[in-house]
Amino acid sequence: MITLTELKCLADAQSSYHILKPWWDVFWYYITLIMLLVAVLAGALQLTQSRVLCCLPCKVEFDNHCAVPWDLLKASANMSSSDPGTPLPLPLRIQNDLHRQQYSYIDAVCYEKQLHWFAKFFPYLVLLHTLIFAACSNFWLHYPSTSSRLEHFVAILHKCFDSPWTTRALSETVAEQSVRPLTLSKSKVLLSSSGCSADVDSSKQSLPYPQPGLESAGIESPTSSVLDKKEGEQAKAIFEKVKRFRMHVEQKDIIYRVYLKQIIVKVILFVLIITYVPYFLTYITLEIDCSVDVQAFTGYKRYQCVYSLAEIFKVLASFYVILVILYGLTSSYSLWWMLRSSLKQYSFEALREKSNYSDIPDVKNDFAFILHLADQYDPLYSKRFSIFLSEVSENKLKQINLNNEWTVEKLKSKLVKNSQDKVELHLFMLNGLPDNVFELTEIEVLSLELIPEVKLPSAISQLVNLKELHVYHSSLLVDHPALGFLEENLKILRLKFTEMGKIPRWVFHLKNLKELYLSGCVLPEQLSTMQLEGFQDLKNLRTLYLKSSLSRIPQVITDLLPSLQKLSLDNEGSKLVVLNNLKKMVNLKSLELISCDLERIPHSIFSLNNLHELDLKENNLKTVEEIISFQHLQNLSCLKLWHNNIAYIPAQIGALSNLEQLSLNHNNIENLPLQLFLCTKLHYLDLSYNHLTFIPEEIQYLSNLQYFAVTNNNIETLPDGLFQCKKLQCLLLGKNSLMSLSPHVGELSNLTHLELIGNYLETLPPELEGCQSLKRSCLIVEENLLNTLPLPVTERLQTCLDKC
């Protein structure tokens, strides 16, 4: 048994489709109801009449039909005048002498044999036509391939209509349209008062932030209405549903074809009805001459019958024909509406012109057709629905949700001091940049990583201490006011791209930029002419770091950045072929060619007379015979040949008298030339991860040595000359073959870091007590060896826990 609740749910489900029914669908509905009433009324009359057909026997026939008294009198008069001898017909003495059951029998037989089928089945024909019309009107709402899409669309549309975000977006558009004339008039007044004339394009004005003129004009600022977190999440869910629905429906036109077919069926049915119903309407008559062979039962073979429903059925049938004509004309109009223009594309052009959401896309196929139907009901539905098709609208919503999630307090908890002792805010994998970031004026470094779309508004000018910007795997757009601020204040910029691409154009406006770090962009072949010219505007650029796969150093760097002081190129293992243009960079002080697959030291380097530092890390150097040419670089103080395949050090290295730092770690060096120790200015020497077996005694000549590392070699003993380097602060001897540590280690009073782990030591010399600067945390040794030290030494080391 169906409950009232189930009936209510069924009614609600049907009423929810009203927004997809245009005016002709509503007109069809009411005409169908009236047709149904006609069918019910006719059927009820036919069923409630006990004698639909009333028949009397014909006792006298005249002229092949039953004779009535006046017919007999007329016939008698005619016969007497023409032939006086002819007997007259019987006088008016007709009597009904049949039994009631015989009359019922005659009525039934004449109803079945002589009554026309149209007069007999008229109510049922009307009912059948009405049911077909009703089925055609609702078929697309229940057909499996269309009903699910329609139900989904109606559910989404209702949510779009009721969403607070829709109301906010539309009110924002109205407020912007209202304030544009006000802003335009104020701009003209200001321009005229200053004696200047200009054309103001009001269509390009925007209101990203509350405008002071809005409140005074009595208009609420669009940004003053803030969605709560729940409303924002609901709107976000609607955006996702609209995207999935559009992807699923826009590629098909099933709904359009089903709706078109059912209208064609209606038109065909209308033509058929209007063709045969008026014709058969003439067969509904009041009097019926019934001639049946039932004389054996009644004594008569001819009867005169009366159809009691003839007149009312004629009226109902005529009224029904009028209804069918109205229904058919409406169906013909709907068919003309579907065929006269393309309903498989819906354009929001008018809405784009009136609103600030100019990116609302046009839709196609079933999606477009459904919106056309909704327009016939109320254009406001499609207008509200379009808000959830706009990426601009979605981005604004994301921004609001982001602001609700990232409060000022939460952002403050993310502030840290980086290795340069700068206040840094690192934001990772967000949907955008929270507006509350601009409240933290103490930020010095802003780092944005894996944020799909970031837009820097003019509010960034509030970060007065911002000097450094990191953008990793993110797309950054900069407003014009924000670019003006960055142009004056930004000193360091780090950009890392996920995909190969071009440098953003706004980078070349940063005229005060001093350091630029680019990773992942292709420079030499894919830089446009605009970008080639853009580099020359970076007149204050001193440091450039490139991490990419290049075949040559880009000409834009050597030609347009002659004042560059530091160039770092990480080629990620790709071979760097052409290096001759390096000669042009005469002001270069630091050069890093990392992972460039170099087999020899490029000769073009020896022309850089101002070079202080050279780093050739992770190349394929096997020999460094060109090291003799480094003597022409009088200012060279730092040489890094680490992570290569160098087998030996040439004796000519002794000519580098100004060398202060030398990194030869992670090579294949087995012996050290004595000429190395002629570089008496060395204070940093790293020989770790090689194949050394001993250290020459001449190391004592390196009187300025402060850092010495021979970790992971095969050294068995240490020369006493090593302990003559009194300035030594860091001594790394781990992972060697040392059997003992000389007591002279106590003479290194400046020693702060000592690594001995991974050797064959059995005891530690008590003279370690002389290393007064050595801390326990900076003594890297096995724990069991600490027990071999005298107790006072151990206690001193344990009580001082400062880190290195």
Image: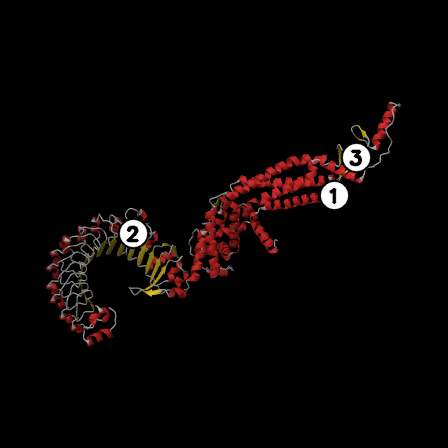
Earlier-in-chain disc, 1 versus 2: 1
Name the foreground residue: 672 vs 47: 47
Label placed on residue 318: none
* Location of mark 2 (residue): 535
Earlier-in-chain disc, 3 versus 1: 1
Disc 1 crowd rating (10 Å Cα; few below 14, some 14-19, many 20+) is: few
Vertical order, 695 against 73 (above or below): below
- Tell me: 83 left or right of 384: right
What residue appears at the point 26 percent right and 56 percent down from the top-left corner? 543
Q: Nearer the viewer, mark 2 or mark 3?
A: 3
Alpha carbons under labels 1 and 2: distance apart: 101 Å
Name the foreground residue: 197 vs 211: 211
- Position of the C terminus, as image quadrant, is bottom left
Q: Amino acid at mark 1?
A: Gln
* Location of mark 1 (residue): 49
In this view, the residue farthest toward the right is 84
- Tell me: 571 left or right of 176: left
Instruction: Report whether residue 137 is seen.
Output: yes
Q: Amino acid at mark 2?
A: Phe
Residue 10, position as x, y percentages in the image: 58, 52
Residue 48, position as x, y percentages in the image: 73, 45
* Location of mark 3 (residue): 298
Q: Secondary structure at mark 3?
A: helix
